[in-house]
Image (cartoon, rainbow, N blue to C red):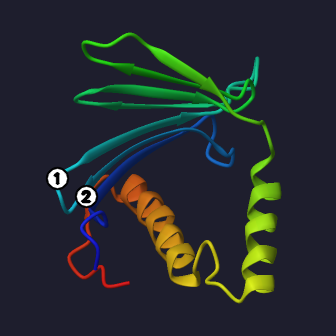
C-alpha cells in the first residue's frame, strides 16, 4: 500500500434531469497522508475547456492542453510558463504501450492501477447517491 492512496472520498453529481448525463461533479478526496484534493469537473456547452489547475500551499500550476501552455505560480517568485507539444493522450498511451511490448518493459499503467481508478469512480457514484463519504479502510490493491 502506498501513502498516496485514498483514505476517503465524497462526491456530488449534478444532472439537468434524472436520465441526463452528469453536467458537474464535485469530488473531495483525502489521501492517507492527509492531502485534500478537490475536483470540480463540469461540462460546458458554449466552449471546450481543456485545462487543469492544481492549487497547493506553495503555489499553483495551470496546464492547458489545447494551447500546450503550462504556467507555474509560486509564492515569492515570478510566474513562469513553458510550452509542450500538443499531442492527443491516446497517441502517448499507444506509443508507451508498444514501447513496453518491444522492450519487454512493464506497462506504463498496470491492470491494478486501472482497477484502482475504476474503484474510485464507482466510489464517487456511490457516495453521490448515498450522500455519505466513503472510507477506504480496506483499500488493499
Work out which residue is located at the far front of the displayed protein and give it. 103
Which is more toward the observer, 117 or 46? Answer: 117
Q: Residue at x 80, y 46 (%)?
A: 88
Residue farthest toward the left in the current orientation of the protein: 34
Q: Residue 18: percent from the left, percent from the top?
A: 61, 46
The answer to which of 93 and 43 lies nearer the viewer is: 93
Percent coordinates x, y for residue 59 in the rendering: 31, 24
Q: Residue under label 1, please give it.
A: 34
Q: Is residue 49 left or right of residue 98?
A: left
Task: Answer above or below: position of 81 versus 88.
Answer: above
Disc 2 is placed on an element classified as strand
Q: Are marks 1 and 2 in contact (CB under 8 Å)?
A: yes
Q: Which residue is mark 2?
A: 31
Of 73 and 133, the residue lying toward us: 73
* Residue placed most toward the observer, 52 or 131: 52
Q: Quadrant of residue 120?
A: bottom left
Question: Seen in the image, is 41 located left or right of residue 8?
Answer: right
Amino acid at each position: 500500500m502506498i501513502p498516496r492512496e485514498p483514505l476517503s472520498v465524497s462526491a456530488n453529481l449534478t444532472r439537468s434531469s434524472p436520465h441526463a448525463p452528469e453536467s458537474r461533479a464535485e469530488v473531495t478526496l483525502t489521501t492517507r497522508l492527509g492531502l485534500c484534493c478537490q475536483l470540480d469537473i463540469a461540462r460546458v456547452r458554449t466552449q471546450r475547456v481543456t485545462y487543469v489547475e492544481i492549487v497547493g500551499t506553495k503555489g499553483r500550476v495551470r496546464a492547458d492542453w489545447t494551447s500546450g501552455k503550462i504556467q507555474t505560480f509560486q509564492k515569492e517568485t515570478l510566474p513562469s510558463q513553458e510550452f509542450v507539444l500538443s499531442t492527443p493522450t491516446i497517441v502517448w498511451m499507444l506509443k508507451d504501450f508498444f514501447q513496453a511490448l518491444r522492450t519487454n518493459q512493464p506497462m506504463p499503467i498496470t491492470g491494478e492501477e486501472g482497477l484502482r481508478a475504476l474503484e474510485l469512480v464507482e466510489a464517487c457514484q456511490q457516495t453521490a447517491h448515498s450522500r455519505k463519504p466513503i472510507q477506504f479502510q480496506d483499500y488493499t490493491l
